């Protein structure tokens, strides 16, 4: 028997996150491991009057392609990509895996080449998103590999996921609306502000938010959510930050990451583990060394590190910055194939000031 919380999560994704309308073409992109949730998502889309198309992914197929494809094949973009990017109303991404490290031994340059092959599709989607003509949401299906990464049993991880998404509540939509309303107060306070300074044992950083907007991450893009974020002025970040948790990208853990920014760009980067991979990702393209995001996690219900950025970047009491692609909806204009979030704990002897006024101290908002 399917866990009833799976159907609830599907309804959240379809009817709250992307609000499927009658006649819309919806792409569902998910792992074969996530079939119970994909089946329920398809049902919910059909009940809403939408037209679902299902793309299934498998770790073995993905690894096999990346291992055996030559450079020309890695660069090739399917003609279907443009058709999809230009015509779908929304997409639902559902991640699950049997092995979180299945890409670890694929050379970074091959992964970069493959990422660049999707740049055209991403540009089309970004333009449509800016115009309000495209919606998306991403989530994870609780599976053994992700539970193991989080140091939990599968049943414990299922409880964690469905609690974090509010799929265990009688009225999940009302719960997410409350998150939206609380975060809206923070964003209203930040409107029109110019300078952010962040100080603590792990950070000494300044950046400009002049002319930029903060976005209310309320479960309509990532599920679960709980953060307020922006794209800083591209040449404004100065200082250094040391990340409290491993930075994970394409199945590789990079530990002890420390970045130094000058005039918005990473000018020095180090790590205690997988430093060469860190540097290679920062060299993906011209925009990869720019700070594309500054964010504060607001979800105090996510109280542990799981090695999944979907949850970890929302941990209440942390901030995260991303190198690479910025957010057009926040006013950002940095383009990159990379967008890599890295998390810094702010719960001890740390503060954020905005235009000199105390905004956040030791993991708690002060306004």
Image: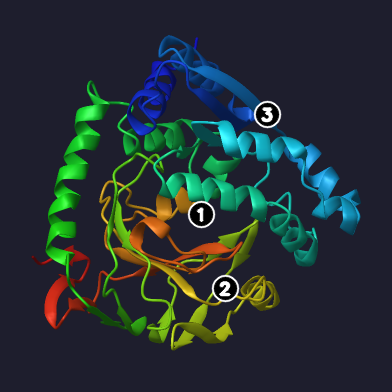
Question: Residue 52: x percent and y percent?
Answer: 56, 20
Please state if 357 lies on the left or on the right of 76 as rendered: left
Q: Which residue position holds label 2? A: 287
Q: Which residue position holds label 1? A: 307
Q: Secondary structure at mark 2?
A: loop
Q: Which residue position holds label 3? A: 56
For marks 2 and 3 on the same chain, the one whose residue lies earlier in the sequence = 3
For marks 1 and 3 on the same chain, the one whose residue lies earlier in the sequence = 3
Above or below, comparing residue 51 to residue 159 in the picture: above
Q: Residue at x 48, y 44 (%)?
A: 128
Within 10 Å of disc 1 (Cα), the crowding (few <14, some 14-19, many 20+) is many
Which-is-in-front pick, marks 2 and 3?
2
For marks 2 and 3, give the CA distance: 31 Å
Q: Nearer the viewer, residue 107 or 75?
A: 75
Above or below, comparing residue 279 to residue 49 in the picture: below
Please state if 286 lies on the left or on the right of 261 as rendered: right
Q: Secondary structure at mark 1?
A: loop
Question: Residue 240: x percent and y percent?
Answer: 41, 86
Colour scheme of the picture: rainbow
**Quadrant holding the C terminus:** bottom left
Q: Residue at x 50, y 81 (%)?
A: 258
Question: Residue 127: x percent and y percent?
Answer: 50, 50
């Amino acid at each position: 028997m399917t866990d009833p919380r799976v159907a609830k999560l599907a309804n959240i994704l379809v009817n709250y996150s992307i609000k499927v309308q009658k006649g819309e073409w919806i792409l569902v992109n998910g792992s074969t491991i996530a079939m119970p949730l994909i089946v329920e998502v398809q049902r919910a889309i059909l009940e809403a009057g939408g037209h679902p198309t299902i793309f299934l992914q498998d770790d073995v197929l993905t690894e096999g392609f990346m291992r055996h494809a030559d450079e020309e094949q890695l660069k090739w973009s399917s003609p279907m990509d443009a058709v999809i990017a230009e015509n779908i109303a929304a997409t639902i991404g559902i991640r699950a895996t049997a092995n979180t490290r299945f890409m670890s031994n694929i050379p970074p340059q091959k992964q970069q080449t493959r990422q660049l092959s999707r740049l055209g599709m991403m540009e089309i989607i970004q333009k449509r998103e800016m115009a309000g003509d495209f919606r998306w949401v991403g989530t994870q299906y609780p599976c053994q590999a992700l539970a193991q990464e989080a140091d939990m049993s599968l049943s414990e991880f299922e409880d964690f996921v469905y609690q974090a998404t509010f799929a265990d509540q009688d009225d999940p939509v009302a719960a997410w609306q409350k998150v939206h309303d609380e975060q809206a107060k923070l964003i209203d306070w930040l409107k029109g502000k110019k300078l952010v300074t962040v100080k603590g044992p792990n950070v000494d950083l300044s950046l400009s938010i002049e002319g930029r907007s903060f976005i209310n991450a309320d479960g309509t893009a990532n599920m679960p959510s709980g953060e307020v974020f922006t794209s800083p002025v591209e040449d404004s970040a100065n200082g250094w930050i040391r990340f409290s948790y491993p930075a994970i990208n394409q199945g590789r853990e990079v530990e002890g990451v420390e970045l130094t920014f000058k005039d918005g760009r990473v000018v020095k980067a180090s790590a205690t583990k997988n430093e060469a991979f860190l540097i290679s990702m920062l060299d993906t393209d011209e925009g990869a060394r720019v700070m594309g995001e500054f964010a504060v996690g607001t979800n105090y219900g996510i109280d542990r590190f799981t090695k999944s950025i979907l949850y970890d970047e929302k941990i209440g009491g942390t901030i995260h910055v991303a190198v690479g692609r910025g957010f057009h909806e926040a006013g950002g204009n940095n383009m990159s194939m990379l967008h890599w979030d890295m998390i810094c704990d702010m719960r001890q002897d740390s503060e954020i000031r905005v235009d000199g006024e105390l905004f956040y101290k030791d993991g708690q908002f002060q306004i």
